[in-house]
């Protein structure tokens, strides 16, 4: 038993070291630049691929390996600097979600480009003697390399601490973390400071990717999977806190080692449960602090009743939508049905994110719950279509109401991360409880009944429910509820002082958004005839985020425009090119740089100007 | 040293400054007086570049600095001490001073930590203390000292006496005199005339975003109607 304990301890420490190398750069970058860098995982992935190329060309000795890893770190650091200068520097004054959108687009492009350079095959590092060596611990053998990692983690941590404590550069970086404008008034050009910080963070990611090679393979998926892990560590530790990241790495690494050994089925859920518990107990992470929101760009927010021109445009769009089935073929009709569902999904997230001020990274949870609820009602309970839709919506709404009790007390990135954690937990549940959900195989045969009249009938149903639902949400925002909600977002203390119950308002918005997303999911289940765990996945949450941000968060027509443009772009790209990630990423970057207010926002500005 | 002409600044769509103009001679102290909301802070923020002016010229020494980013203006030789002091709370006193450090300028004796500790003896003992754990007066001294580390030729002080005990106030006054004796120019925004009386060579009175009266201290003392009109609470 002692042997087992010690071995798991070492395994946990090695995992912790690996996690820390992954997350340290992210937290350093966030701490100074306030950029939530979604491309951090891609830098880590590049570290792995570049590391593979360099290390396999170096002599198979420890020195060759170390030099290869360091060279990798240097190259990735240079790439990070280029990313900062070329893209992020233009976005510091934009709302933080735009930086997220832009870095997400970079992650998409990185995945595509990596595949073009290194191919789709996973790359495993050959294991020369010094990497395959092991030490005996009791009856078991423990890899020598992992022992080296256990030493490297703390060494990097201490080196970073020394850098920030003792050098002028470190002092300036810490000052910039606290108050960039004041530092600028002292004559410090923060642009180069930020570039340096970005290079440092990227270099750490590259180093982590290269050092992770002996224990894992380089895969194209690791960009998105590792960024989730990194976010969890950074959020649990407290955004921007290096020591917090170290502590959180340790906690998660050890919990993982022991948790998996004791309860093997906990693998997928455990990490997110840790994050959820940590955030409920400490809303700003273990060592985080309440963020200073001064200097943030305020969301442009001019939600007004539609102008006559906009009404006319909307009416024309509606008429076109009504006429569509009579001219469109089956493929276009199915794309249009999806766009309608996307519209309701996006509108529900917009309610939370825009007027509600609660950005969610896990909005797919409600969409997926609605889909599963409707599918289970239809399959297991033999419920007719209308009842199944209602049950899907109610399931999502009820779970959102329960979860909302906890989550609406948080704010900003923390709230976004807790919603992500919840969505991942639901996703893991759907994967693991196959008896109910069908697991990875999903639930099949959820088709609309014959009386509905096939795809055309379903299209009209979707049109009625989605446009109707989105209009209901829009109406709610122009009611006193919507004004109170925006008041609570913009000036929580003042709103509370005039007697608004902020928590309840936010909870109501959260529940409403969850139910609406659930209805969208329920419709989607019938549109596709099936439900899969991917409906709950990060990808779908990101779809919703992209649609809302593309459309523009400060306008009511934003989600309408964003949903249609995004669905159209996505489907068109998927058909037209195998480089859809590259093109979509580039398109998003271009849009973020050209229309920092979103498409509808930009149009609205033009009209007003 | 500094010439400001027809300066107009905005917050969003709201115009705050209307054609502000004045000049400061080398080595002199000018005080901006005016009621709360008159636009004094905005003048200083426009000069340092935090609120870039939409129109007008700011000539500092030989260069037009209007529209430059704050770090370029600071490097040109203008120091800014904001009303809220904005010391870096997590950094120690010594580290805060380090953030302001820039190379010496010809004709000015360079500021060092040692010289600043002589100017503000209270700071010397607090060298290793995080700035967040100091009193308001100590933070004010640190904020001034930090700016001086950049060896500015002109220092903008926004309400340096606000909320300070009389003893602290006197120390700040002494420091301002010492700076002027070093040849540093100062532009000080103040709500009450007390501080100005002690140090000002020139008084500028603001109301509703414009300069409505300017002259020497003695002239202001003699002009009772102006004081009544612009400065009475």
Image (tube, coloured by chain):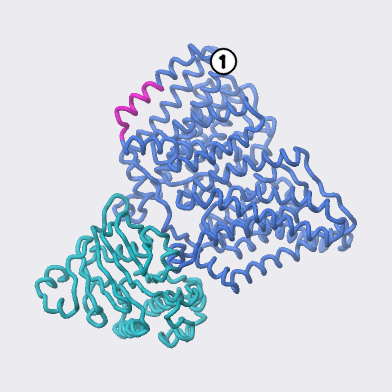
Chain colours: A blue, B cyan
Above or below, A559 relative to B96: above
How many numbered markers are drawn? 1
- Rendered image quadrant of residue A436: top right
Residue B116 relative to residue B16: left or right: right
Residue at screen point 58% across, 38% down: A585
In the rendered image, which quarter contains the N terminus of chain B? bottom left
Please give the range of residues in magenta.
A305-317
Q: Which residue is at the front of the view, B6 or A76?
A: B6
Q: Which residue is mark 1?
A: A330
Using a 10 Å C-alpha cutoff, classify the residue at mark 1 as few (fewer than 14 neighbours), some (14 to 19) or many (20 or more). few
Above or below, A264 relative to A376: below
Q: In the rendering, at what x and y percent does residue B21 appear?
A: 25, 64
Q: Chain of mark 1?
A: A
Q: In the rendering, at what x and y percent does residue A190 appear?
A: 50, 61
Q: Magenta residues: mostly which secondary structure?
A: helix
Work out whether residue A465 can be spotted: yes
Above or below, A279 relative to A560: below
Q: In the rendering, at what x and y percent does residue A224 appear?
A: 65, 44
Residue at screen point 21% across, 62% down: B210
Residue A308 within the segment the image draws in magenta = yes
Q: In the rendering, at what x and y percent does residue A488 appear?
A: 36, 49
Secondary structure under badge 1? helix
Residue A447 within the segment the image draws in magenta = no
Residue A230 relative to residue A93: left or right: right
Work out whether residue A282 can be spotted: no
């Amino acid at each position: 038993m002692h042997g087992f304990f010690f071995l798991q301890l070492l395994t946990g420490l090695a995992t912790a070291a690996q996690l820390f190398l992954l997350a340290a750069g992210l937290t350093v970058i966030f701490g100074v630049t306030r950029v939530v860098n979604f491309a951090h995982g891609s830098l880590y992935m590049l570290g792995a691929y570049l590391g593979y190329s360099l290390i396999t060309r170096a002599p198979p000795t420890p020195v060759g390996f170390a030099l290869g890893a360091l060279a990798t770190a240097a190259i990735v650091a240079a790439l990070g600097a280029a990313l900062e200068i070329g893209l992020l520097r233009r976005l510091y004054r934009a709302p933080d979600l735009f930086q997220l959108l832009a870095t997400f687009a970079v992650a998409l492009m990185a995945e595509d480009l990596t595949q073009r350079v290194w191919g789709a095959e996973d790359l495993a590092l050959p294991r020369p003697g010094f990497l395959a060596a092991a030490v005996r611990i009791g009856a078991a053998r423990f890899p020598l390399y992992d022992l080296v990692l256990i030493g490297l983690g703390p060494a990097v941590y201490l080196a970073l601490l020394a850098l920030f404590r003792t050098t002028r550069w470190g002092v300036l970086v810490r000052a910039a973390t606290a108050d960039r404008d004041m530092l600028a008034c002292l004559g410090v050009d923060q642009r180069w400071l930020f570039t340096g910080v970005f290079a440092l963070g990227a270099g750490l990611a590259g180093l982590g990717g290269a050092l992770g090679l002996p224990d894992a393979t380089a895969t194209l998926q690791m960009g998105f999977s590792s960024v989730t892990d990194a976010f969890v560590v950074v959020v649990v530790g407290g955004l921007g806190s290096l020591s917090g990241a170290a502590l959180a790495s340790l906690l998660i690494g050890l919990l993982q080692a022991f948790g998996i050994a004791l309860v093997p089925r906990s693998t997928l859920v455990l990490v997110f449960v840790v994050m959820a518990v940590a955030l409920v107990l400490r809303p700003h992470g273990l060592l985080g602090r309440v963020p200073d929101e001064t200097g943030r760009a305020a969301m442009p927010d001019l939600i007004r009743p539609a102008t006559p021109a906009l009404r006319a445009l909307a009416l024309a769009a509606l008429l076109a939508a009504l006429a569509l089935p009579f001219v469109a073929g089956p493929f276009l009709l199915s794309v249009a049905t999806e766009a309608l569902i996307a519209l309701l999904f996006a509108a529900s997230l917009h309610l939370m994110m825009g007027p509600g001020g609660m950005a969610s990274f896990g909005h797919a949870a409600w969409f997926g719950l609605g889909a599963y609820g409707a599918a289970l009602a239809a399959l297991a309970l033999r419920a007719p279509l209308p009842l199944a839709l209602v049950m899907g919506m109610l399931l999502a709404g009820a779970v959102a109401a329960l979860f909302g009790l906890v989550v609406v007390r948080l704010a900003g990135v923390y709230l976004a991360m807790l919603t992500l954690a919840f969505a991942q937990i639901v996703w893991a549940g759907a994967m693991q409880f196959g008896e109910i959900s069908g697991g990875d195989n999903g639930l099949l045969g959820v088709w609309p009944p014959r009386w509905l009249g096939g795809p055309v009938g379903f299209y009209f149903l979707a049109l009625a429910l989605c446009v109707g639902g989105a209009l209901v949400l829009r109406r709610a925002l122009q009611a006193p509820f919507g004004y109170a909600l925006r008041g609570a977002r913009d000036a929580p203390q003042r709103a509370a002082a005039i007697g608004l119950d902020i928590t309840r308002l936010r909870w109501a918005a959260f529940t409403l958004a969850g139910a609406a997303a659930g209805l969208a999911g329920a419709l989607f289940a019938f549109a596709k005839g099936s439900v899969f765990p991917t409906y709950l996945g990060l990808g779908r949450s990101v779809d919703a985020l992209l649609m809302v941000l593309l459309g523009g968060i400060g306008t009511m027509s934003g989600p309408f425009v964003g949903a249609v443009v995004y669905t159209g772009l996505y489907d068109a790209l998927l058909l037209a090119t195998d480089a859809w990630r590259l093109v979509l990423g580039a398109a998003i970057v271009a849009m973020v740089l050209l229309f920092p207010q979103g498409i509808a926002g930009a149009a609205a500005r033009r009209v007003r100007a | 040293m500094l010439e400001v002409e027809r300066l107009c600044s905005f917050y969003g769509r709201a115009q705050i400054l209307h054609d502000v103009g004045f000049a400061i001679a080398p080595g002199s102290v000018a005080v901006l007086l005016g009621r709360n909301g008159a636009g004094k802070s905005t003048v200083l923020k426009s000069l340092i570049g935090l609120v870039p002016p939409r129109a007008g010229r700011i000539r500092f020494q030989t260069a037009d600095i209007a529209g430059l980013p704050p770090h370029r203006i600071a490097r040109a030789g203008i120091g800014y001490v904001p009303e809220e002091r904005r010391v870096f709370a997590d950094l120690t006193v010594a580290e805060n001073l380090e953030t302001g450090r820039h190379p010496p300028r010809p004709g000015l004796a360079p500021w060092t930590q040692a010289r600043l500790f002589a100017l503000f003896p209270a700071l010397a003992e607090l060298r290793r203390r995080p700035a967040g754990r100091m009193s308001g007066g100590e933070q004010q001294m640190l904020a001034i000292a930090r700016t001086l580390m950049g060896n500015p030729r002109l220092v903008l002080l926004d309400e340096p006496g606000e909320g300070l005990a009389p003893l602290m106030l006197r120390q700040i006054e002494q420091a301002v005199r010492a700076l002027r004796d070093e040849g540093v120019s100062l532009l000080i925004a103040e709500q009450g005339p007390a501080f100005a009386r002690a140090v000002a060579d020139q008084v500028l009175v603001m109301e509703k975003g414009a300069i409505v009266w300017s002259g020497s201290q003695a002239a202001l003392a003699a002009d009772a109607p102006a004081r009544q009109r612009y400065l009475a609470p």
